[in-house]
Image (cartoon, rainbow, N blue to C red):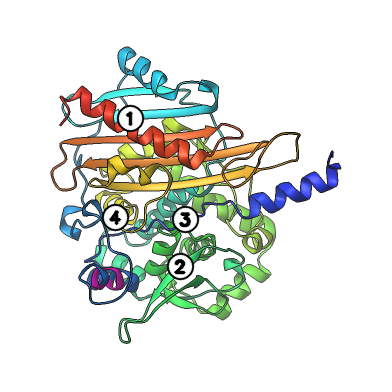
């Protein structure tokens, strides 16, 4: 049976609506509640001690805050030339469907002799929720611009600013962890209009369970911070007035200033990495985005390298973004490889898939037959705390009809083995 164009479009839209980074990988070190006020961290810390009922973390997810730090602080090198033999080995790991992958790997096990390989590294596509690292960069750039010499003021804004979810948060099916520190009660559900949390908690929800609702609110707050400067935070009434009464063209210009300028100011290539719209439907309606969202393996690798060197905004901002990427709960996709269980993994993932009926084809989540985007970025320190192996990976793929989450997981294991062999199976 052949679908009509209208039915095919409807099916594709339903599939894509449910596909934006499902999963629950969470971030930030577990002992950081007093530093950040992020309440779910206290819940997970107590769970690891057996004091409350929740998941426990593998060894790789239990580094203390002081040990989650920048490993290349003070360095200023960019990507070295690709190593031909490493390139050959990388292509061999991919097997067939080479055209469906963009991959970059930077081996820093010996930081004095970095080794780089890439395949289709400028292949560009929508990277889904990986684009939330661009939102994080935009927020920390705005904080630094408002308080260039006052780190305590930046922390205060993150930790004490109360944000109330409004229409910008709607809608998203991803659940977030809401832990009551006093009663020790844990609730997991999607963010609803009226939910209140600190700005730091909304950023954590955006980066950890990858809530699109949280991303919508963080993007709203980043624009308000850029607009109001030291007068931020503003009241909910003023926020509503500003977004309701400001001409759409001016809002689009503010969007570009908030989310595009930090890319170029941090010497990244806007033609290779961009978040061009809100992550929520209401956000897109309120603030028209200026264009497409996309990324490439090479530019995402340059983002990770500059972060590790402390060159995304400044060392403090780079460190905070890295901590927000530290996986401290159930690992998904690339990060779920059993080979990485004992590794500290700093990770972001995103997906988009699209289906249409075709004879003899099974199509479903992460197995699109029209579009099957899967995107992963990771820093691996293995084992956690010792770093006998230390490397970065950025991977984007569009291999139709295959379970891309499983493909990324399998590739993670093969690549980890290869890098171990390169260093004498450390």
Expressed as whole percent of the image width and height from the top left, the position of residue 162 reads: 42, 77
Q: Residue at x 20, y 50 (%)?
A: 69
> CB atoms at circles 1 and 4 under 8 Å apart?
no
**Crowd band around label 2 with a 10 angstrom C-alpha radius: few (<14), some (14–19), many (20+):** many
Expressed as whole percent of the image width and height from the top left, the position of residue 152 reads: 25, 67
C-alpha distance separating marks 1 and 4: 24 Å
Q: Quadrant of the N terminus?
A: top right
- The residue to which callout 1 is attached is 415
C-alpha distance separating marks 2 and 1: 31 Å
**Above or below, 199 relative to 83:** below
In front: 405, or 284? 405
Asked whether residue 268 appears in the rendered view, the answer is no
- The residue to which callout 3 is attached is 23
Q: Residue furthest top?
A: 84
Q: Is residue 214 left or right of residue 253?
A: left
**Above or below, 327 relative to 4:** below
Say which label, 1 or 4, has the lower sequence index. Answer: 4
- The residue to which callout 4 is attached is 323
- The residue to which callout 2 is attached is 176
Q: Nearer the viewer, mark 2 or mark 4?
A: 2
C-alpha distance separating marks 2 and 4: 18 Å
Q: Quadrant of the C terminus?
A: top left
> CB atoms at circles 4 and 3 under 8 Å apart?
no
Q: Quadrant of residue 52?
A: bottom left
The chief SS type of the magenta part is: helix
Say which label, 2 or 1, has the lower sequence index. Answer: 2
Residues in magenta, as a range: 42-46
């Amino acid at each position: 049976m052949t679908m009509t164009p209208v039915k095919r479009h409807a099916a594709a839209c339903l599939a894509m609506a449910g596909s934006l980074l499902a999963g629950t990988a969470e971030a930030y070190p577990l002992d950081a509640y007093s530093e950040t006020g992020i309440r779910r961290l206290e819940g997970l810390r107590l769970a690891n001690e057996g004091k409350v009922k929740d998941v426990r973390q593998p060894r790789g997810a239990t580094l203390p805050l002081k040990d989650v730090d920048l490993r290349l602080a003070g360095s200023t090198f960019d990507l070295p030339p690709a190593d031909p033999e490493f390139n050959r080995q990388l292509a061999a790991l991919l097997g067939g469907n080479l055209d469906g992958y963009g991959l970059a790997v930077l081996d820093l096990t010996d930081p004095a002799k970095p080794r780089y390989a890439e395949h289709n590294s400028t292949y560009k596509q929508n990277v889904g929720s990986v684009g939330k690292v661009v939102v994080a960069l935009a927020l920390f750039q705005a904080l630094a611009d408002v308080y260039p010499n006052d780190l305590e003021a930046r922390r205060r804004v993150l930790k004490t600013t109360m944000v109330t979810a409004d229409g910008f948060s709607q809608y998203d099916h991803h659940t977030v962890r809401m832990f009551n520190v006093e009663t020790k009660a844990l609730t997991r559900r999607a963010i609803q209009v009226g939910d209140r949390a600190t700005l730091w908690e909304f950023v954590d929800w955006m980066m950890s369970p990858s809530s699109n609702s949280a991303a919508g609110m963080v993007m709203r707050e980043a624009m308000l911070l850029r607009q109001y400067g030291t007068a931020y935070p503003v009241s909910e009434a003023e926020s509503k007035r500003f977004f309701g009464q400001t001409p759409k063209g001016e809002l689009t210009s503010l969007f570009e200033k908030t989310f595009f300028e930090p890319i170029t100011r941090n010497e990244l290539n806007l033609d290779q990495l961009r978040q061009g719209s809100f992550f929520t439907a209401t956000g897109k309606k309120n603030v028209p985005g200026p264009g497409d969202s996309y990324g490439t393996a090479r530019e995402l690798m340059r983002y990770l390298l500059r972060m590790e060197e402390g060159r995304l905004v400044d060392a403090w901002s780079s460190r905070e973004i890295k901590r927000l990427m530290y996986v401290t709960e159930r690992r998904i996709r690339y990060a779920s490889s059993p080979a990485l269980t004992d590794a500290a993994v700093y990770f972001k993932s995103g997906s988009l898939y699209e289906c249409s009926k075709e004879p003899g084809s099974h199509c479903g989540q992460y197995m699109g037959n029209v579009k099957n985007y899967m995107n992963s970025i990771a820093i691996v320190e293995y084992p956690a705390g010792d770093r006998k192996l230390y490397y970065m990976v950025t991977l984007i793929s569009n291999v139709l009809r295959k379970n891309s989450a499983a493909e990324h997981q399998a590739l993670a294991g093969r690549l980890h083995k290869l890098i171990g062999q390169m260093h004498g199976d450390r």
